[in-house]
Amino acid sequence: MQLGIDDLAFATAGRYLDLADLAPVHGVEPAKYTVGLGQDRMSVCAPDEDVVTLAAAAALPLVEALADDERAAIRTVLLATESGIDQSKSAGVYVHALLGLSPAARVVELKQACYSGTSALQMALALVARNPEQKVLVICSDVARYDIGSAGEPTQGCGAVAMLVTANPRLVAIEPVSGLHTSDVMDFWRPNYRTTAVVDGRLSLRAYTDALTGAWEDFRAQGGAEFGDIDAFVYHQPFTKMAVKAHAHLTRLAGAPRDAAVMDAQIADTLRYNREIGNSYTASMYIGLVSLLDHATEDLGGSRIGFFSYGSGAVGELFTGVVQPGYRAHLRTAAHRRLLDERDRVSHAEYLRIVAPVNPVDGGEHDVERLTRGPFRLAAITGHQRLYEPTTAAATAVA
Ligand code: COA
């Protein structure tokens, strides 16, 4: 029996900052960002968008596509994020309610920087292996924020990916072998009292590469596929140039020929969406997968994909999946393209106005400015409670 990803969609904010508008503020050439980091734009959350609204928006089309009995088969929701909105309550519980899922479900939030979505996927596979009738909804949702004016600022972004994990998946069957690597590194973290991450950028790039080395060596020791038997590679993308660097590193490590055209073809389609979205932490690698499936001109059915998931701190996991024949009939390519094309470009001044999260601490009544065009919004923070509401007929209908 094959286990894996049966349905897949992403969501992002309705606004973006073009990095050409940030470069002069930092006193650099736009090419530093577009070429040096491989980023053109970054999605910027409005005050009424957060990891809950993004997660629910990503999962909405998956839930809408299910019949009532299939929705009831979702007995687990795993929400991976490092931009949590509460220290105790899972963001997944809000999402579960917004999506009108069955109360006969377990819901939990997972955290380990950008890695935890992969942990959620592996846990989902284990649950489905135990009961193949069950479906698990895995959602990765994050808002990447660094200090204004810092080197990390151009690598912000936000987005969410929803994956329905089932037996006999229609998109990608995940293979059983994983290569794992954990080491205690202070390359990137966010203490409870901060709304932006603390990052040692240079160290994080070294820690990423070290984790890739460790995970690949473990993957091969565990009997994982040879490099030459993997057709495409999806890497975690804090900025897309990082995937280019990682792929060069892995190619060298595996002793494979360093043919620039071949190496480019193995990753190019995985980078397209993230160039426009920016970093979305846990969602980034899986948006890379959506990008590959949506953009590949040849039919990838039967192709093996290598995945490298990295989360600072640091945990890395390398695993593979096989694209299923007929997968193209189940993609949401047009909706994803529309989502990106319909975003509004904001000025640098407007970006500065909306980029900080709404964060009142007095327990009073705070309505949140209505800006999003997404299907769900954060409407108010009242008595320390976050109040969400659907904004479209489709979102209202599902609840
Ligand atoms: N044209 C083309 N490329 C240019 C350029 C120009 N005018 N100016 C600079 N560059 C290149 C640099 O050569 C460099 O490329 P290289 O690394 O391949 O040599 C790249 O642009 C970045 O320049 P650099 O000076 O290293 O950038 P920086 O010190 O301002 O910061 C990061 C870069 C990535 C360290 C920073 O954005 C950061 O900390 N981001 C967060 C990292 C992160 O998310 N880590 C956690 C998860 S892994």
Image (tube, rainbow, N blue to C red):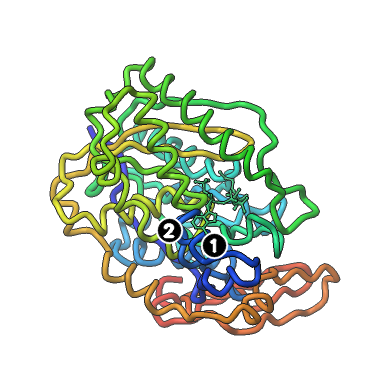
Residue 121 as seen in the image, left or right of residue 290: right
Decide which of tag 2 and tag 1 comes sooner along the chain.
1
Q: What residue is shown at x 69% (from left), y 52% (from top)?
A: 197
Residue 41: percent from left, percent from top = 48, 67
- Residue 55 visible to the viewer: no
In this view, 78 is above or below 379: above
Residue 4 as seen in the image, left or right of residue 12: left
* Mark 2 to mark 1 CA distance (whole Å): 9 Å
Q: Quadrant of residue 67?
A: bottom left
Residue 266: percent from left, percent from top = 27, 43
Q: Which mark is residue 157?
A: 1
Q: Quadrant of residue 290?
A: bottom left
Residue 266 versus residue 248: which sits nearer the camera?
248
Q: What residue is shown at x 44% (from left), y 78% (from top)?
A: 343
User: Where the N terminus falls, by quadrant?
Assistant: top left
Labelled pair 2, 1 in contact (Cβ < 8 Å): yes
- The residue wearing badge 2 is 274
In this view, 359 is above or below 257: below
